[in-house]
Image (spheres, rainbow, N blue to C red):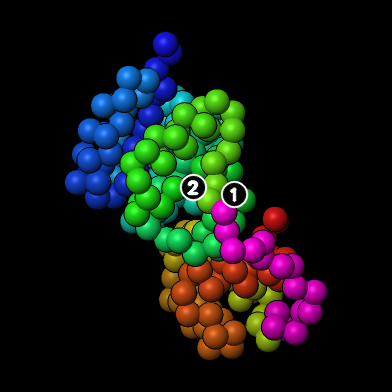
Amino acid sequence: MSRIRVLIADDHALVRSGLRALLEAQPDLDVIGEAEDGVVAVECCRRLRPDVVVMDLKMPGRGGISATEDLGVECPETKVVVLTMHDDDAYVHMARLAGARGFVLKKSLATELIHAIRAVQAGKTCFPAIASALPRRTDRAPLDLITEREREVLTLIALGHTTPAIARRLHISEKTVETHRAHIRDKLGLHTRADLVRFALEHGLLKA
């Protein structure tokens, strides 16, 4: 039996240790590496070429969504299974858009993660049922409340980019990024990243 080569990406050492023990107890799974953030995860994938990455969403620096997008370009043969505590439907949509093949909640049974790894390696997808597909809004009135630059910042935040990354991409200061973020929050009432993701999807700022 060919063993599935797995990389674990999570910023908590105890979580990585627990996942390693869980996965290596399976006869067909082999943990070949660990990463504490998205940057290291991409670097490890370039070097080790795992079959599957178990990817946390929220990590310091580059998070799981951004890292998953990079892997789709740099290591397209590697499949990503998102493992997260965030059960908002918006994150499931974001994981799909980024190119993940599976999505498992940390509160799930261990068998669900193992099943997801095996499923994506077999060429399938493994996503939870969500309450409903996010509708595409046709009215543009809310978007008219924010400037073009604020729209760019909102989109990049929804895609998982950090403040420093947005500043570099748009050639503005980090303070300016935070100012735009505050304006977006005040004008649209979007206080969490899940709110931003949902708004961006509903108003066509992200490709669904």
Under circle 1, the secondary element is helix
- Residue drawn where x is 74% and y is 67% of the image: 136
- Residue drawn where x is 62% and y is 72% of the image: 199
* Amino acid of disc 1: Arg
Under circle 2, the secondary element is strand
**Dot in front, 2 or 1:** 2
Q: Would you call the spot at circle 1 few (<14 residues within 10 Å), some (14-19), or many (20 or more)?
A: some
- Residue drawn where x is 31% and y is 31% of the image: 23
The disc at residue 96 is 1
> Where does the image place residue 94, in percent across and percent down from the top left?
57, 56
* Amino acid of disc 2: Phe
User: Is 102 located above or below residue 1 in the figure?
Assistant: below
Q: CA distance from mark 2 to mark 1?
A: 9 Å
Residue 89 belongs to the span the image colors magenta: no
Q: Horizontally, is 35 left or right of 140 in the view? A: left
Instruction: Mark 2 and mark 1 in contact? Answer it, CB < 8 Å.
Output: yes
